[in-house]
Amino acid sequence: MSDQLKVANFLQRNDGESIAYHHTPGKGPGVMFLTGFKSDMQGGKALALEAHCVSMGYAFTRFDYFGHGESSGAFDDGTIGRWANDTGIILDKICEGPQVLVGSSMGGWIMLLTALRQPEKVCGLVGIAAAPDFTHDLIPERLTPEQSDDLESQGYCDIPNCYDDQEPYRIWKRFLDEGNQHLLLTDDIKLDVPVRLIQGMLDEDVPWKTAHSIMDRLTSDDVEVQFVKSGDHRLSEPQDIDRLLRTVEALLEQL
């Protein structure tokens, strides 16, 4: 039976909440996949990367943040800090030895926060349309005057969801305010591990210049950015998946 069809394991947090995860033991460094905003560990990139890493004998871990997928909690109660904390708990309790963190969109922000907090557990980073600071740099500037008014008057606003016309994203002011406590692009990002960033030039959610900003802020000398001329935000087409697998495999071989 393939891993994605197996029942998830659950790690109990001290606060009573549970984090759903799948972990396949193997050689190190292990690979850990961090999903994006309102995504889950059953996505195509996570499953393809899992199959590839396991085929090469590497340990692999994927999980759902609080309020996502099979984990407990309500999505609207989640925050960047909470989800970064979930990541750190999985890293400590489930993963063995140094890990390569692979972060998609918001997961790219969380992988950077995690590497800064637990540098001894992280030996490499791969960002896919990485979106650090999006609560400050991306969402507020795109709100209409009406949405901004809703945010102030009722504490939330709804914005279009390009992946689901029937279910808009609900953005809470408290979520934005909390996220702004974890900004990274305002100063040096003091990490000295290899970093690989993959960024679509047609990404309508995360500007390609964000990848440049991350590279400029990182203190590591080993940073590479791959710009994909026809790439969108999801970077989930077959050629995009192949690129991701090649990038992670090359980094594992380097390490």
Image (tube, rainbow, N blue to C red):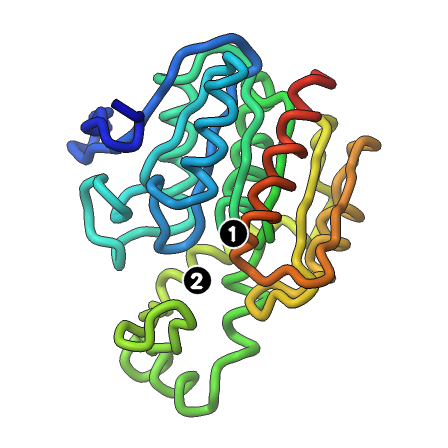
Which of the 4 image quarters holds residue 19? top left
Label of residue 177 in the image = 2
- Which quadrant is home to the N terminus? top left
Q: Nearer the viewer, residue 126 or 193?
A: 126
- Residue under label 1: 236
Q: Is residue 184 left or right of residue 222?
A: left
Label of residue 20 in the image = none
Which of the 4 image quarters holds residue 115? top right
- Which quadrant is home to the C terminus? top right
Q: Is residue 34 left or right of residue 191?
A: left
The residue positioned 51% from the left and 22% from the top of the image is: 53
Q: x, y (%) of residue 242?
A: 60, 40
Q: Is residue 147 left or right of residue 20?
A: right
Q: x, y (%) of residue 77?
A: 26, 54
Which of the 4 image quarters holds residue 154? bottom left
Dots 2, 1 in contact, CB < 8 A: no
